[in-house]
Image (cartoon, rainbow, N blue to C red):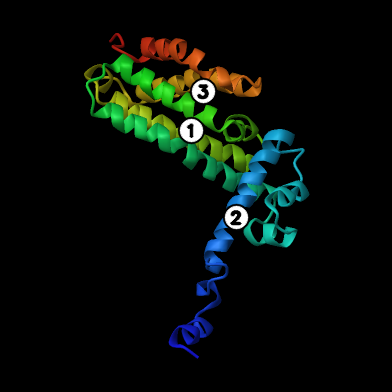
Amino acid sequence: MTRQQAARQTAPASARPYAGKSLDARRAEQRERILLSARDVFATRGYAGAGIEEIVAGARVSRTTFYAFFENKEECLLALFEFGVQRLARPVLEAVAATAFGDLSPAERIRAEVGAVAAALAAEPAMARIVLIEMVGATPRAERARVEARNEAARIIELQLEQYDAWRRRTPLQRRVASLAAMAAIGEPISDLVATGRIAEWEAVVEPVSEFVARGLIAPSD
């Protein structure tokens, strides 16, 4: 027996490779397959109409494997929402960072960021449906998770407003309300496209949404 073979025999199960992958890596892949299958099932059937059997069939795993990761369908939805928000937020945060160090005007920054939000959601229409539509009121826990994510997104807008003198003179409540209103102005038109199966038309809404948001956020009167 070689030293390498002896090491494999004495290694913990999670460290032993199978088909070139450790148990931990294989489990991570299984979990992601379940989440992506759940995304498609929830997007097609809705949360209430989705069944675990459909999810595991799409993921090519057993019910036992599903319950090794998630206690029930709600836990799966919550994990999917977190997974989806992370995926969708990445290009948006990159756009926010990019505009922060350029020579863009406030209106140009708004347009670039609105475009990034719309493009990210359009690139993953099934995930967009989960995040924008299926989470709304699905369960009390789902609604709390959705509100928390909304609050985090609104905070990004608040931090941007604080860079401008006109908004620094306003109260925290005024900045908070403006941030939430801006989010609604961006989110509702895109949600409508998702709900009506027209998300491919996302580019058409970027300009009017950007103009509307800019009118509310740029140079507010004291």
- Res 142 quadrant in image: top right
Element type at marker 1?
A: helix
Viewer-side residue, 188 vs 11: 11
Q: Earlier in the sequence, mark 1 or mark 3?
A: 1
In the displayed structure, 158 sits above or below 35; it is above
Q: Classify mark 2: residues with Cα within 10 Å, few (<14), some (14-19) or many (20+).
A: many
Image quadrant holding the C terminus, namely: top left
| Rendered location of residue 62, percent (x, y) | 73, 59
> Residue visible at 43% across and 32% down?
153
The residue nearer to you, when weighing 58 against 170, is 58
Q: Earlier in the sequence, mark 1 or mark 2?
A: 2
Q: Residue furthest front?
A: 2
Instruction: Name the amino acid, label 3.
Output: Gly
Marks 1 and 3, Cα distance to the nearest angstrom? Answer: 10 Å
CA–CA distance in space, label 1 to label 2: 25 Å
For marks 3 and 2 on the same chain, the one whose residue lies earlier in the sequence: 2
The residue at which mark 3 appears reads as 187
Query: Going 57% across and 67% down the picture, which residue do you hit?
Result: 19
Q: Mark 1 highlights which residue?
A: 150
Q: Quadrant of residue 96 in the image? A: top left
Q: Which mark is residue 31?
A: 2
What is the three-letter code of the residue carrying label 1?
A: Arg
